[in-house]
Amino acid sequence: MVDYEKLVGSIYDCAANPELWPDALALIRDAVGGAYALVGFVDLSEMSQGQQPFFKRHNSVWDEEWLLKLERALMLIPGGGGLQNTDVDESWTQLSRTPEAEFQTSDFYKSLIQPMNLRDTINTPYIRRPTMMGMLSIPCSQTRQPYGDVEARLTGNLTPHVRRAMMINDIVDKGNMATMLYRKVLDTLSVAVFVVGLGRRVKFTNARGDAMLRDDILLGLNNQTLQAKRTAGAESALDDAIDRALKGDAAVGISGIGVPLIGTNGSRAAAYVLPIAGHDLRGEMGPGHCAVFVANRSEQQPLVIEILRTLFDLTVSEARVAALLAKGEKPVSIATTLDVSVNTIRSHLKHAYAKTDTADQTSLSALIHSVLPPIVEV
Amino acid sequence: MSPNYDTLVSSIYDCAANPDLWPHVCCEVRDALDAAFVVVGLIDKAEPHQRQAKWHRRNSPWDERWLDTLHEMTLSDPKQNTLHALDTDVAWTQLGSMPENTFRQTEFYKLWVEPQKLRDTLNIKYLCRDMQQGILGAYTKANRAPIRVHEKKLAESLSPHIRRAVLINDLTQAGLQTQRLFRHVLDKLSVAVFIVGNSQRLVFTNAAGDQMLSEGEYLKCVSGSLQSRRDVGQATGFEHAVETALKGDTALGTVGIGVPLMSSTGDRAAAYVLPLSGHDVRGDLAAGHCAVFVTRRGEHPPMAIDTLRSLFDLTASEARVALLVAKGDGPQRIMQALGVSVHTVRTHLKHCFAKTGSPDQTALSGVINTLLPPLK
């Protein structure tokens, strides 16, 4: 007999780490005396949209191909209709519903149960809602007696714990899900983002930030702390800015502290250091965190053409000229690049001014920069 | 085994999801152990900047003034050493560790136990890791027998569950912390960010997005879903782009790039719709999500003059001129804004060109604009 306390404990281990279900289910299988144990979850909500019901299951080691076949044959279970009316934490056993002789004549028995030398099955719902059902299901082998009250009591005691473990896991998962979505958004930004915590240690880097550290031109990591390769100001300007922001220095203000960076190749960029720990964060977690944003002049985005066309109805040629202009090119060099006359370029520009309500090259260029999203090219 | 063991265990794990329920668990354990009150304590030394250990306490109702002195009392008590030496999940009782007569002569008894009409104590260490120790304490009344063996056993069987519940909660809290940090970062962006889930449901809005929604221009949130303002006669390109992105269509192509949005006054903003679904977002349970970025023609975020000066060795006046150029102003406007002559502006500009390596105003504007952070 498996120690009941251990059994319960192993179920809750899965609340934090669902990958442990096979272990917990192996313990349950042995305690009940089954061939395998499975917790399965059917979500019928997407059936209304014409999709297959969604199955999710965890099980102790068993033939996975056979289990897939079983999923598709659920509707064929003799007496299975009663399963849907079984209360949560109550047990349904195959052979108490259908006499064994009758059960053995069913297709379900012949195609699935018999080939695996199985006999009875005990099913105990742990969750039942209009569109979803979760069940603990434990078939037994032909060599043992059909299930009785002892097993029904045991599974009925265990399913509340299974339910609670699943719910805790849902809460953990929902949090993880939100965190992951935020991270993905941060990864789409063209600006490098570093979240820095206690001791100036980098806690998070977005994709652009990773690339910046890999390049090792503007910023590097030393002992998990962010290091400026060179600054145009004091050598410790970045460290000082981060320290001030970590302290939540009110003087840092909303716009943060700008730190001019000079790359090892002479390129220039500005790092912006902002405190991000509001009161809600600092109270619980000691000193605050800060974010370092680095915008770098080498980032040019050919999205411009699409944007100008959709926003201002520019033609492709006009948009192309405007995009090159925003990159800093002059009409003469644009003419060379596009292999057209300077006059053509000037006429494109004139149309672009009119459509965007701008007066000249400088204001058109500024407009383009203001509508560019800070995201990397997709 | 106590008949309500399963209920007790269930209550303990409810605290994994909601730590506010610990006092409730303390009551249940108190009743199961026939105690006067029960304390679930955690001694936390995790914060290096704190010199003193932090003592968190959850308990069943009892005079809080007495409980406030408990930690100090136990620290001054000689038995503290015994407590430290306790093995995890092994129950220790006061009267099991020394004769009652001896105990009654201790200061702890006279100052703390006797005045409250208490008698025996059960302590069990449910958690012991580097910087944290967790102890469950049950205090019995003077009018009952000392703690019995089966009560010790019950406490010992609950201890691993308390540990697990605390650890699960830690995990959840750590996740929440990261989530909040990310949200704070997104709130700093000047671009409006929306995360949209199934059925165009708005899942997240950053601060700039909130601002945009409250202005009611370009986009609105109708019964939880993000919509463009169709009342101003615009096409449904936005809705189409979002739907396509939600399907996780990798062939979204340029549909999501620069979708025009119109305001009631005819101003335009550009929306960028990006699918966020990927392998790690459980495509199975959570159908796709997408991110919507909205930029509009507007004021630039100001760049600190000082930052610009030190980046390119500009003088304050040159930096001021350069920032106006980046905003789109020509020499005439700059002249008016700064109250200087065209000649002066031209001179400043010439220096700016030389120092930033730009041949002209447009190039200078490009250089400065790419250095501007997309921040509020």
Image (cartoon, rainbow, N blue to C red):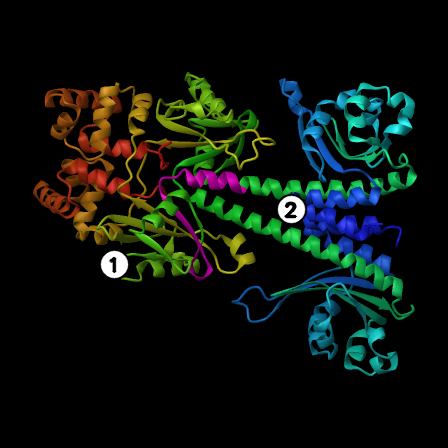
Please state the horizontal and vertical placement of residue B66, each as a whole percent of the image. Answer: 75, 69
- The local secondary structure at tag 2 comes to loop
Q: Amino acid at mark 2?
A: Asn
Residue B35 appearing in the image: no
In the drawing, what numbered circle is on residue A17?
2
Q: Residues within 10 Å of mark 1 (few under 14, many from 20)?
A: some
* Image location (x, y in percent) of residue A210: 39, 47
C-alpha distance separating marks 1 and 2: 49 Å
Label 1 or label 2, whichever comes before in sequence order: 2
Q: Residues within 10 Å of mark 2 (few under 14, many from 20)?
A: few
Q: Are marks 1 and 2 on the same chain?
A: yes
Dot label at residue A233: 1
At 70% from the left and 42% from the top, the residue drawn is A22
Q: Which residues are magenta?
A: A179-202
Q: Is residue A188 magenta?
A: yes
In the image, which is nearer the foreground, mark 1 or mark 2? 2
Please indicate whether residue B339 sits to the left or right of residue A140 in the image.
Answer: left
Asked which secondary structure carries label 1, the reply is loop
**Label 1 chain ID:** A
